[in-house]
């Protein structure tokens, strides 16, 4: 190529970008920014509206149409100082139940996934297929059976029956085992079996291999499963409403419902104030564990 052509090409490159019209820039990639802006507005507007309602003195949603027209902290004071509706007790119950459920789900699901991934035993494929079929049906389909089962258990073991927080934890653990085991199974398959064989040659037992070698390598999927279990149990309403009957044992979802369940007596201002405070632990959990989310959700799709 001659020097004149090179100079012409070099002279055209910067000029070609500057001569692009607004429509051409929009077609090349500008529409992505518009779509992202619309998505952000669509996602943030309900949160902004709820925050405005929680700061409104009217106590209704219709009075919050003018966002932040009037600002007061009365709803938050009423929420935290109401002896008949102990918000802090409900918050502690939700944190306790969700934390135990998250830890139990991780331990049970990881143990089951490790067994299916590393061991070869009879009915292994049938067990995996059963887990796949079980997770297709939501747990809510069995809420009548769950109520009758807990009612029968409460006569023998009251701490696991109706109106017990441990009974609700047991229900959550049973419902999450199938889906989470199958999710972890794909991630465990990405860990080379050579590590197990090398550790076995060094005299390590299966439990030592599991706790000291495998679990540290699958930390992303453990974090993701624990986070999803925490959020699901933290925001659950129907199962908690069925199991828990004592107001002192209510979770946040069940307790906050009391503010809007009375006809002509709904207090949406206090309800939205409780909803805003309830969202803080989940947001902090996402921010703290966000570096594990993508790798944990996509790692199991590589091999399995």
Image: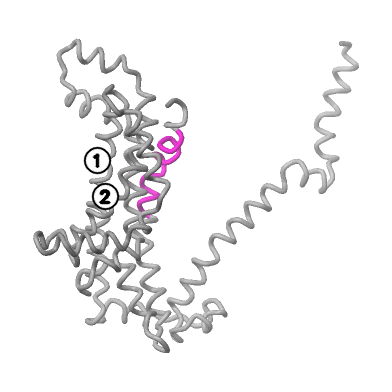
Q: Quadrant of residue 276?
A: bottom left
Q: Which quarter of the rendering shows the C terminus? A: top left
Q: Quadrant of residue 237?
A: bottom left
CB atoms of marks 1 and 2 within 8 Å:
yes
Q: Position of residue 173 (x, y in %)?
A: 26, 49
Q: Which mark is residue 108?
A: 1
State the residue lying farthest toward the bottom. Answer: 264
Query: How many residues crowd mark 2 within 10 Å: few (<14), some (14–19), many (20+)?
Result: many
Q: According to the image, what is the colour scheme of the structure?
A: one colour
Prevailing secondary structure of the magenta residues: helix
x 34%, y 32%: residue: 126
Labelled disc at residue 197: none
Residue 183, percent across and down? 38, 37
Label 1, label 2: how many angstroms apart (C-alpha)? Answer: 8 Å
- Give above or below for 211 relative to 87: above
Q: Which residue is mark 2?
A: 173
Q: Residue at x 82, y 39 (%)?
A: 18
Q: Secondary structure at mark 1?
A: helix
The x and y percentages for residue 31 are 72, 48
* Nearer to us in this view, 251 or 5: 251
Relative depth, front residue between 5 and 215: 215
Q: Nearer the viewer, residue 267 or 190?
A: 190
> Quarter of the image containing the N terminus?
top right
Residue 251 magenta-highlighted = no
Identify the mark nearer the N-term, 1 or 2: 1
Q: Which residues are magenta?
A: 284-298
Q: Residue at x 31, y 78 (%)?
A: 79
């Amino acid at each position: 190529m001659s020097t004149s052509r090179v100079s012409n090409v070099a002279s055209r490159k910067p000029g070609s970008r500057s001569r692009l019209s607004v429509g051409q820039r929009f077609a090349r990639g500008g529409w992505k920014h518009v779509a992202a802006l619309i998505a952000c507005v669509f996602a943030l507007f309900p949160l902004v509206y709820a925050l405005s309602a929680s700061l409104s003195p009217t106590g209704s949603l219709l009075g919050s149409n003018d966002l932040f027209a009037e600002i007061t902290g009365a709803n938050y004071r009423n929420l935290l100082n109401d002896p008949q509706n102990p918000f802090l007790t409900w918050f502690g119950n939700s944190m306790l139940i969700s934390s135990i459920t998250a830890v139990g789900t991780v331990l049970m699901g990881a143990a089951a996934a490790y067994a299916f991934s590393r061991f070869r035993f009879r009915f292994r494929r049938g067990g995996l297929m059963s887990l796949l079929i079980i997770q297709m049906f939501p747990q809510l389909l069995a809420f009548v059976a769950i109520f009758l089962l807990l009612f029968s258990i409460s006569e023998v073991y009251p701490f696991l029956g109706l109106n017990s927080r441990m009974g609700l934890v047991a229900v959550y653990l049973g419902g999450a085992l199938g889906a989470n085991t199958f999710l972890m199974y794909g991630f465990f398959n990405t860990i080379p079996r050579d590590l197990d064989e090398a550790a076995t040659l060094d005299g390590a037992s299966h439990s030592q291999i599991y706790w000291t070698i495998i679990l540290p390598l699958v930390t992303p999927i453990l974090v993701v499963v624990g986070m999803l279990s925490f959020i699901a149990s933290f925001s659950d309403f129907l199962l908690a409403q069925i199991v828990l009957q004592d107001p002192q044992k209510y979770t946040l979802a069940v307790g906050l419902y009391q503010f809007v369940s009375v006809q002509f007596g709904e207090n949406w201002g206090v309800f939205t104030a409780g909803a805003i405070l309830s969202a803080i632990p989940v947001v902090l959990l996402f921010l703290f564990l966000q570096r594990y989310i993508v790798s944990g959700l996509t790692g199991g799709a590589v091999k399995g």
